Image (cartoon, coloured by chain):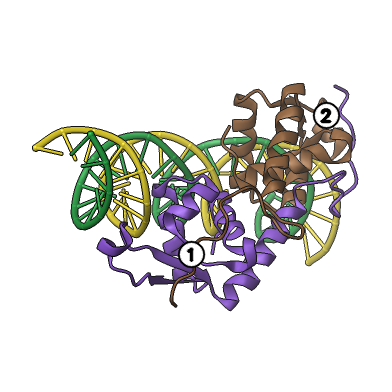
Chain colours: A brown, B purple, C green, D yellow
Amino acid sequence: MRMTIPVAKVLSALLADAEAPRYGLDLMKLTGLPSGTLYPVLHRLQAAGWLAADWEEVDPATAGRPARRYYLLTAEGVHAARQALAELRALAPDGGTSWGGAEPTGVPAW
Amino acid sequence: MRMTIPVAKVLSALLADAEAPRYGLDLMKLTGLPSGTLYPVLHRLQAAGWLAADWEEVDPATAGRPARRYYLLTAEGVHAARQALAELRALAPDGGTSWGGAEPTGVPAW
DNA sequence: CCACCCTATATAGAAATCCGATACAGTGCC
DNA sequence: GGCACTGTATCGGATTTCTATATAGGGTGG
């Protein structure tokens, strides 16, 4: 699973609110991603085994809307998502980053 | 400027340590990015006006190594980088995200 | 009825991005 | 000469993003 910002947004939304099940349009609004980005991400997450999907069982005529496809992180997905987001947080400083690197290199004449 | 994780890593490294000037190999070690990823990122940042670059003025024979190309964030770059990293931080929860979205949607039968 | 908007999911195709491989060049060492 | 190290940089295939577009049923208004 390659971590990208859209993937991180989806994982973040799926992790929030006690891992409540989400459906596509819901995730589009939460993440701000267009459907053409979101659905491929969801498919990749499923292929990676991080995400499970199931059709909502309702009669469209009764519900007055199309059936939704609900997504829920697997146990592995929850774990992986937490770890991935933690790594992301590591490079977004709160005060000063100072993630163990080399000390400032020689300043140019400039 | 499209924000991606490699771009964020570079910005983070450039912001750290009081915005000390950095050169390519230095940034490769700090960010862990391969040169094939790093240099295109640096070029894009320059094209966006976020980054300034200048050749170190040394005699390679005297220094015992090739001249370095130093990179420093512009004023605009510093501002933009801080903002971009803040947005990244927003989606990497520390405790609970709860970034104002819709409340949990109806749970599936499943 | 028919147009139109809303909820939903999904794909096509062009553009952008990432990353392993490769290139180039000078220094230092054996 | 050969090899390792410091540096910067590009190429090309694979992946990813994103703008359109497709599909389909429900509800509303003329």
The amino acid type found where label 2 is placed reads: Asp
Q: Quadrant of the N terminus of chain B?
A: bottom right
- Residue positioned 43% across, 45% down in the render: B34
Contact check, label 2 and label 1, Cβ < 8 Å: no
SS class, disc 1: loop
Q: Chain of mark 1?
A: A
Q: Nearer the viewer, residue A41 or A36?
A: A41
A18 vs B87: above or below: above
In-image side of D14 versus A42 (left or right): left
Tell which of B68 and B13 is nearer to you.
B68
Name which residue type carries label 1. Gly
SS assignment at label 2: loop
Residue occupying the point 80% across, 33% down:
A60
- A54 vs C26, left or right, is right
Return the chain for callout 2.
Answer: A
Q: Which residue is under mark 1?
A: A106
Q: Of residues A98 and A34, which is closer to you in this image?
A: A98
Looking at the figure, which quarter contains the C terminus of chain B? top right
Q: Residues within 10 Å of mark 1 (few under 14, many from 20)?
A: few
The residue pinned by badge 2 equals A59
Image position of B79 with respect to D11: above or below: below
Location of residue A27 (image quadrant):
top right
Residue A84 % position (x, y): 68, 37
**Disc on the earlier residue, 2 or 1:** 2
Q: Residues within 10 Å of mark 2 (few under 14, many from 20)?
A: few
